[in-house]
């Protein structure tokens, strides 16, 4: 889509086809299967061949299929760490797609395919920008790193975790960490009259809580007062019906204050009251799932299992409830909340697998101002605000490595576009890809000088 007040930058066919070629590499991450080595190798060869200056002038260290680039600076220290990831989520139903999800179709307006937004376009845009700056003889004043993980969609344990450990080993401390997360929305923020650029400063934590119970079983013709399935269902209902409390965190208060110029009345006036009427504001935000996630640790029952046959009393039952944890809450606090609400010693409540605490929220310092200024240059009508990422990104593995963390890409999207991410018909407009390349070029140009 094209928004009013955006730059007219678009991409030519050669640039669009390079991204399309990357989308044809089926680099799918699955929890229950190993990565397709051939497809990741295909993508690696594509990057090596299409960006010769990058692979001549930058140092590359590999961690499995993950790639850590170092662009040496002329002065000591590290300016920025830019993140992206190579892997994509699986496709549920290929028949619903306008074009096959891994065909990499390019038409006059869009580049189609899984990964077009999340997140191959970001990786390719960084490399396109760097290749052009190298062609001009530019070099960073201080070192810049690019970290391209290969397993972000399954929590980055083999990719981002190892690259972040390497940066800590090198004692890297950067001004800026830049990753995916926020975008520029149009017609999405309730009451907004202009595009809203959400530059996220951190992310929520997450935990999956497992509820389990057992019973003696038997024939369904002689049941007790409650079966194992009934007990688990009751426990899940209690957790769902008693969510964790609403809370206005400092970063969301800052987000709302910055959004006021984009809002029509009466919301503009209502937001003026946020510092003294946080409870009213949070209740207003809780009316929509998209904004409730910003003011609450969310509760999502996702799996329930139990029983083997209609006429057999189940001997065991279990359920899974996924929580996305607001800064200020914790994994331990989520567990304590579940146990208090369920209040049934016959139900065992534990965290399943790995969990992640909410990230540190960085302040909107000088590096944020750089990103905000570049965003306004690329999309002049956008109102720039802050926020937190409700999902999980590779950034959490790099916590503390940069003074300022920004999760953001300057692509302009509406509600329908957002549904395409991890959904059907994922695509990126040529105009958005042009903005993404120009944005990364300007970010990197800020840290470079001519004659390197």
Image (tube, rainbow, N blue to C red):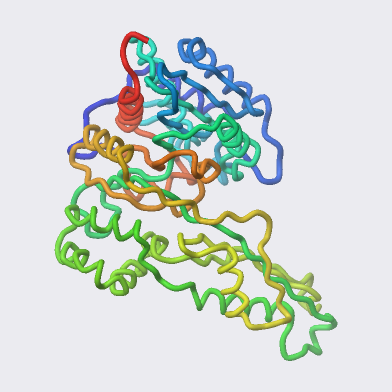
- Quadrant in which the N terminus is drawn: top left
204 relative to 378, above or below: below
314 relative to 402, above or below: below
Of 349 and 162, nearer the camera is: 162
Please tell me in which quadrant of the rendered image residue 430 appears.
Answer: top left
- Please indicate, yes or no, whether residue 317 appears anywhere in the rendered image: yes
Please tell me in which quadrant of the rendered image residue 285 appears.
Answer: bottom left
Q: Is residue 22 left or right of residue 197?
A: right
Residue 197 image point, x, y percent = 29, 45
Q: Is residue 135 left or right of residue 163?
A: left
Of 257 and 41, nearer the camera is: 257
- Please indicate, yes or no, whether residue 27 appears anywhere in the rendered image: no
Of 260 and 370, nearer the camera is: 370
Residue 93 image point, x, y percent = 56, 45
Of 330 and 308, nearer the camera is: 330
Q: For the point 53% across and 30% down, which residue is it?
A: 148
- Quadrant in which the C terminus is drawn: top left
Q: For the point 63% across and 83% down, which residue is it?
A: 343
């Amino acid at each position: 889509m094209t928004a009013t007040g955006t730059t007219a930058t678009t991409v030519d066919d050669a640039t669009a086809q390079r991204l399309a070629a990357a989308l044809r590499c089926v680099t799918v991450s699955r929890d229950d299967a190993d990565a397709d080595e051939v497809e990741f190798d295909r993508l690696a060869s594509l990057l090596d061949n299409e960006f010769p200056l990058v692979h001549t002038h930058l140092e590359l260290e590999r961690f499995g299929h993950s790639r850590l680039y170092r662009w040496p600076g002329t002065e000591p220290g590290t300016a920025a760490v830019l993140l992206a990831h190579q892997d994509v989520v699986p496709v549920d139903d290929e028949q619903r797609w306008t074009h096959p999800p891994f065909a990499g179709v390019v038409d006059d307006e869009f580049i189609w395919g899984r990964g077009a937004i999340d997140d191959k376009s970001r990786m390719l845009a960084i490399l396109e920008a760097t290749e052009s700056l190298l062609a001009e003889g530019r070099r960073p004043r201080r070192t810049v790193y690019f970290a391209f993980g290969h397993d972000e969609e399954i929590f980055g344990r083999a990719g981002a975790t190892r690259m972040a450990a390497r940066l800590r080993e090198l004692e890297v401390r950067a001004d800026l960490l830049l990753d995916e997360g926020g975008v520029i929305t149009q017609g999405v923020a309730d009451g907004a009259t202009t595009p809203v650029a959400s530059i996220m400063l951190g992310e929520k934590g997450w935990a999956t809580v497992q509820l389990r119970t057992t019973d003696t079983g038997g024939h369904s013709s002689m049941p007790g007062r409650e079966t194992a399935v009934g007990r688990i269902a009751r426990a899940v209902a209690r957790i769902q019906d008693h969510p964790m409390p609403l809370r206005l965190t400092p970063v969301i208060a800052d987000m709302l204050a910055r959004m006021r110029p984009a809002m029509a009345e009466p919301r503009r006036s209502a937001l003026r009251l946020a510092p003294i009427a946080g409870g009213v504001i949070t209740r207003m935000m809780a009316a929509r799932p998209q904004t409730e996630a910003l003011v609450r640790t969310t509760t999502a029952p996702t799996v329930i299992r139990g029983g083997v046959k209609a006429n057999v009393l189940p001997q065991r039952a279990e359920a899974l409830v996924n929580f996305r944890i607001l800064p200020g809450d914790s994994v331990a606090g989520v567990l304590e909340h579940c146990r208090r609400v369920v209040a049934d010693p016959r139900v065992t409540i534990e965290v399943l697998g790995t969990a992640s605490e909410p990230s540190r929220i960085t302040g909107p310092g000088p590096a944020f101002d750089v990103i905000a200024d570049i965003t306004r240059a690329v999309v002049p009508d956008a109102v720039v605000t802050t926020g937190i990422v409700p999902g999980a990104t590779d950034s959490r593995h790099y916590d503390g490595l940069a003074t300022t963390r920004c999760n953001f890409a300057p692509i302009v999207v509406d509600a329908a576009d957002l549904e395409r991410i991890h959904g059907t018909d994922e695509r990126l407009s040529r105009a958005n890809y042009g903005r993404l390349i120009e944005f990364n070029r300007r970010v990197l140009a800020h840290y470079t000088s001519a004659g390197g």
